[in-house]
Image (cartoon, helix red, strand yellow):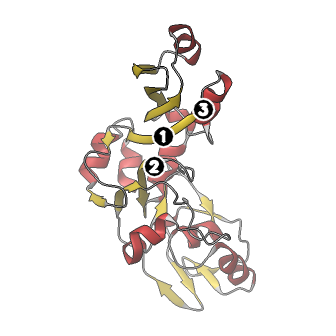
Amino acid sequence: MVVKVPLNRALSKLGILSRVQATEAIRAGRVSVNGLVVRDPARLVVPERVRVAVDGESKAKIRWRTILLHKPRGVVTTRRDPEGRRTVFDVVGESSAGLSAVGRLDLATSGLLLMTTDTQLANWITDPTHAVPRVYVVTVRGAVSPDTLKRLGPEVALRKASRRESHLVVTLREGRNRQVRRMFDVVGHDVMRLKRVALGALELGGLAPGQWRDLTRAEIGAAFPRRGSSDARAI
């Protein structure tokens, strides 16, 4: 499935202008798409399949690139933070040019985060209808009982438990905000540590916090095999 996005968002995703700058430039008639001036920031486009120019200067398409980052705790998944906190783009540094985060991990969560120039890939993974599995290792306060485990659902496995804390593996099929923390709050167990260790068939492996590696198209194809042929062409 090919996903269209608003033009101002496309310019931001492609690293050409920020969302605010893009909106202003489009309304001022400074942006053209396939040779025609567009003044509507909400005009839908497929970023990888259009020619965009700003002030008459053609903007080259950013090359395809996807990285797997081990996001550290205490880092936010935004390009800029109004509170001045460190972001995943600060972690990756200059190598983050043109990349966008695929979904988010909250401030206190560490682990596997994809960053890509491919908006079609990002949209496909985050679309809840595709039910891409997300696997987390969770440490919670207190002993999780068998009855509580049943309440949590079939895709929660208990690794070990003591009076002090329990270690579990949780698999989710959608990326709702703070879902793991909320589900343990409901059963009376505070989450002490939370790390995402897999997304689709991709695994965090031995990457240390703050480290990342480039992925190949073949790895992406193997990790998300349900993507159709039209989606594969988009990457």
Q: Name the residue type under label 2.
A: Ser
> Is 137 situated above or below 16?
above
Q: Tag 2: Cα neighbours inside 10 Å, few (<14), some, or many (≥20)?
A: many
Above or below, 115 against 123 in this view is: below
Q: Position of residue 148 (x, y in %)?
A: 57, 13
Q: Which mark is residue 110?
A: 2
C-beta proximity under 8 Å, tags 1 and 2: yes
Q: Position of residue 103 (x, y in %)?
A: 53, 50
Could you give the CA–CA distance between mark 3 and mark 2, rounded to whole angstroms? 17 Å
Residue at position x 36%, y 53% in the image = 233
Q: Which residue is mark 1?
A: 194
For the residues bearing labels 1 and 3, Cβ distance under 8 angstroms: no
Residue topped by disc 3? 190
At x 56%, y 91%, the residue is 56
Residue 221: x and y, percent? Answer: 30, 45
Precedes in sequence: disc 3 or disc 2: 2
Question: How far is disc 1 from disc 2 in space, using C-alphas?
Answer: 7 Å
As rendered, which of 209 and 29 lies closer to the eye?
A: 209
What x and y, as percent, mark residue 160? 38, 21
State how far apart marks 1 and 3 are (Cα). 11 Å
Residue 17 location, quadrant: bottom right
Q: Is residue 204 above or below residue 31?
A: above
Q: Secondary structure at mark 3?
A: loop
Q: Is 72 on the left or on the right of 77, as rendered?
A: left
Badge 3 density bin: few <14, some 14–19, many ≥20, Cα 10 Å: some
